[in-house]
Image (cartoon, rainbow, N blue to C red):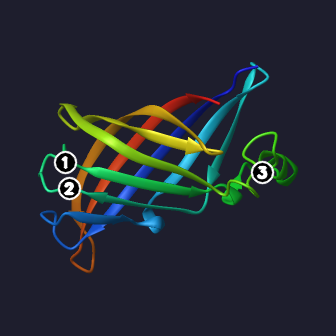
């Protein structure tokens, strides 16, 4: 049976100035969630607690952005320890042999307003496939230390 994953990635990117070209994912204000159709009748939700990423762009509209993102597969949690352990086995992620999922962007296209299309290569278990994310740019704001933060949400569906 085919199962679909929906990855939701909301990122807050800490920057000293929006004109800079490099940003790092802020793990305190970001998350990687998923929802999997289970037996065709319900959904199992979960998340990955450890991840890292970067964005590099020179253009203010971000259309030249290069995005890299990694997820620690061993940090998966669905709220059920036995299921989490099973997801780490060779039946699914094989976390021992393939401890990370990786994404590298190939393009970021502005569609309209704050909506973008992010294309790239997603690697899971050493298998790389093209994926397309729908991205919503949430804007920027200054934090209490004066750093500019940029917010994004990205979603996609993959067939494992």
Q: Name the residue rendered at 19%, 63% in the picture.
A: 21
Confirm or deny contact between disc 3 and disc 1 (CB under 8 A).
no
Decide: is 82 above or below 143.
above
Q: Which mark is residue 62?
A: 1
Decide which of 35, 75 is in the foreground and name it.
75
Percent x, y of residue 91:
81, 39
In the rendered structure, the answer to whether residue 80 lies left or right of residue 47 reads right
Q: Residue at x 45, y 36 (%)?
A: 155
Residue at 30%, 68% in the rendered image: 14
Which of the image's four quarters has the C terminus? top right
Q: Quadrant of residue 75?
A: bottom right
Q: Taking 30 as reference, is 33 above or below it? A: above
Q: Are marks 1 and 2 in contact (CB under 8 Å)?
A: yes
Q: How far from the left and from the top, in percent, is residue 102?
A: 52, 51
- Please name the residue that numbered disc 3 is placed on: 88
Q: What kind of element bears circle 2?
A: loop
158 left or right, relative to 125: left
- For marks 2 and 3, the one nearer the N-term is 2
Please rate how many residues cluster around mark 3, counting C-alpha atoms within 10 Å: few if below 14, some from 14 to 19, many from 20. Answer: many
| The one of 108 and 116 positioned closer to us in this rendering | 108
Measure how far apart labels 3 and 1 are at the Cα level. 35 Å
Q: Quadrant of residue 1?
A: top right
Q: Which residue is mark 2?
A: 57
For the residues labelled 2 and 3, say whether their Cβ atoms are less than 8 Å apart: no
Label 1 element class: loop
Of pointers 1 and 2, the one earlier in the residue sequence: 2
Q: Position of residue 12 (x, y in %)?
A: 36, 59
State left or right for residue 26 relative to residue 94.
Answer: left
């Amino acid at each position: 049976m085919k199962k679909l994953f929906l990855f939701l990635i909301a990122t807050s990117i800490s920057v000293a100035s929006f004109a800079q070209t490099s940003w790092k994912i802020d793990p305190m204000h970001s998350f990687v969630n998923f929802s999997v159709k289970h037996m065709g009748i319900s959904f199992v939700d979960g998340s990955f607690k450890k991840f890292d990423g970067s964005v590099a762009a020179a253009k203010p509209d971000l259309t030249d952005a290069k995005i890299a993102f990694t997820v620690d597969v061993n940090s998966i949690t669905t709220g059920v320890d036995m299921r989490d352990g099973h997801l780490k086995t060779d039946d699914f992620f094989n976390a021992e042999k393939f401890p990370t999922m990786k994404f590298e962007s190939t393009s970021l296209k502005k569609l309209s307003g704050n909506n973008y299309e992010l294309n790239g290569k997603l690697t899971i278990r050493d298998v790389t496939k093209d994926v397309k994310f729908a991205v919503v740019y949430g804007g920027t704001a200054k934090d209490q230390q004066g750093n500019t933060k940029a917010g994004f949400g990205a979603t996609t569906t993959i067939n494992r």
